[in-house]
Amino acid sequence: MMKKSVRWPVFGGAFCLALALSAVPVLAKDTVKVGYIGPLTGGNSAIGLGARNSADLAVRLQNADPKSKYQYELVALDDECKANIGVQVATKMAADAKILGAATHYCSAVALGTVDIYHRFKMPAIVWGAVEPKITYGNDYPEIFRTIGTQEYQNKVAAAFMRSQGYKKFAIIHDTTDYGKAHKEFFTQFITAGGAEVVGIFGVTAEQQDFTTELTKIKALNPEVLYFGGLTPLGVRIRSQMDKLGLKVQFEGTSGIKSDAYISGVGPALAEGTLSFLDGAPVEKLEGGKAFTQAYAQQGYAQPPEAMGIFAFASMKQIIDAIEKAGPSRKAIVKALQGLKEDDTLIGKVTYDKHGQNAIPLMTKYVVQDGKWTVWEDSEYASGKRSLIKVK
Amino acid sequence: MDISLLLQFFINGCMLGMMYALVAVGFTLFFGVLDVIVFSHGDSVMVGAFAGLTFYLLGVYAVPGLPVWASAFFVFLAGMAFVAGAGMLISRFVIMPLRAAPALNTLLATMMLGTVMREAVRLFFPDGSNPKPFPRLLPDWSWKFGDVLLRFDNLALFVAGCLLIVGVAMLINHTRLGMAIRAVAQDAEAAQIMGVNFPLIVLATFAIGSAVAAFAGLMNGLYYNEINFNLGLLLGAIGFSSAVIGGLGNVYGAILGGFVFAFLQVVGTVAMPFSSAYKDVFAFGVVIVLMAIFPTGILSERQSQRV
């Protein structure tokens, strides 16, 4: 009996304290959940973590805004850039009815597998980093949107650019995921339509370490350009091994290697002159770019936002705006997103077509100059001070 | 196909084969002595590469102006010692406690351990998720014979790998320690009755196998000039397959298996009509066929001598 009489007041006190603590936010605002999925571990985690931080930044900025109607909570899950894992975490997220919408995926192979799930659970998802066209154009799902452009347009610009530089003979290495294959197909299509020749195509797995055999074969084929359709980890290995084998041709990548990790991975000297292409404008040229960079720095994230951070930020911001406008229901959010016309976002004006694809009118060409991805037009390569590798 | 190209493919295959062989030697040593498959062995290779990189950075920081050959020597010595130490810890705290348990438990435990090692490097090495450039510690000399590019660093690594393998073989066949290892491999209980210090021999075996793995990791770093936390995964699978096709438990078999696997990959890329994407499918497919023909490996384990 003695014991009991002691315990009750303690318990009661704790209860009151808990009530007092929890009462403040409850009275102020309802909490709603939003999701983020991307590669947080594995070889592509640099991009995924930068994008996660950027999505988180959108949430934090909103929560700091006194005018915000809701308190937002971010649920971030890791797809490891693997389709099987992606399907699991997407199901987990979509099945949680409390999560109203999500900014999802960097890896196209993953996004292709998960769009069906979002559709089945009617959860709005804005793809922030995966560029395979079929993610939006391969279905009629109203829940799927995409802020970033597709590979098709990217390769069209890339092919036109390479032709304008006078290159005529290409060898292609691509990873054998849907993403890498689509890069190969679109680039081959656009470059051969312009009269150039593709002398060899090599598919490689995403885990491969050694490329000396492929590169030796390519050396014998004597191309002017080595085009690589794949992501940073492989890009780093291929560029390093090209040097080892004395394969001195122009190296052309895609948005897949447009990351700081590529340059630090191969070293600035070897990265010099590498080309890549990415949707939208670089962050420092964006209207809200400076504010974004500042706010990002203020939060003290451990990783840089990387190339895709702005897209994840814009995607998350759109979901939040839709919730603020239409209320916390998945259906209402989908409707609000569908109705967007020239929505002002960090990446520029966003309008979704009937497949939920944003028509990004801008593609930026980048070249590595002195250890930095530099916009082609601003580079010394464009001004003629330096030149890309040309083989006779 | 002209001869110089063929020669270049041959050089590439030799480098690859040497790396696989070094990894396979570890698998085969551990199996020989303890009858266990240590699946974290591929990740020991990766840890070796990262340890080397760390010691290089430390060396540059502590002794600025250290000549490159000296830092290369230091990187190899320190990297191999570090992984040898780690290997001993693994054997003492993971393998030995599970000795009485079914072999499957060891298999599973070491697989998990591999994941722990991989993720630890990814999380705790600064910016560990990203590929890291590995310093060029060997001179950049190369000779051109027609279209063939023979690089000094490749040659040096290959020769060093050969010497290491010969050294390990000598150690096992011609020293007292080697005799004890062979005795334990043959019959652990009888060896103990004869006065062999069993736990010590196990530690020594793991130190040797892990140091060889570290060498493979450093070779990997110097050859490709790039390392990443994931490199042990496939290397482990290939090293294990090489040890198995060579004949698990036989050191020479492991070496043979490593080169067989490397050349299968080269052939899969160069000479097969299908896309090079299938080279691993081809190589592993041939491994399955080889296993059907030689169930105990090409150089099968002899009853009298296992290591």
Image (tube, helix red, strand yellow):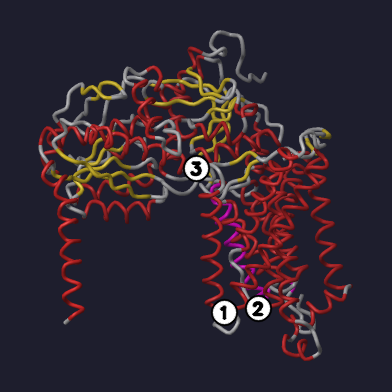
Q: Position of residue B78 (x, y in %)?
A: 75, 52
Mark number displayed over residue A175: 3
Residues behind callouts 1 and 2 on a single chain: yes
Residue denoted by label 1: B103
**Which SS class for mark 3?**
strand
Residue at image location 62% in from the left, 51% down from the top: B268
The quarter of the picture where the C terminus of chain B appears is bottom right
Q: Is residue A70 left or right of residue A88?
A: left
Q: CA distance from mark 3 to mark 1?
A: 37 Å
Q: Position of residue A126 (x, y in %)?
A: 26, 38
| Secondary structure character of the magenta stretch overall | helix
Task: Give the residue at the far right of this rendering.
Answer: B174
Q: Chain of mark 3?
A: A
**Which SS class for mark 2?**
loop
Q: Chain of mark 1?
A: B
Indicate the quadrant where residue B215 lies: bottom right
Q: Position of residue A32 (x, y in %)?
A: 18, 45
Which mark is nearer the camera, 3 or 1? 1
Q: Is residue B215 left or right of residue B107?
A: right
Q: Is residue A66 left or right of residue A363?
A: left
| Proximity of marks 1 and 2: CB atoms separated by less than 8 Å | yes
Q: Which residues are magenta?
A: B277-299
Q: CA distance from mark 3 to mark 2?
A: 38 Å
Check if residue A206 falls in the magenta segment: no
Residue denoted by label 2: B35
Tell me which amino acid carries mark 3: Asp
Q: Chain of mark 2?
A: B
Check if residue B282 falls in the magenta segment: yes
Tell me which amino acid carries mark 1: Ala
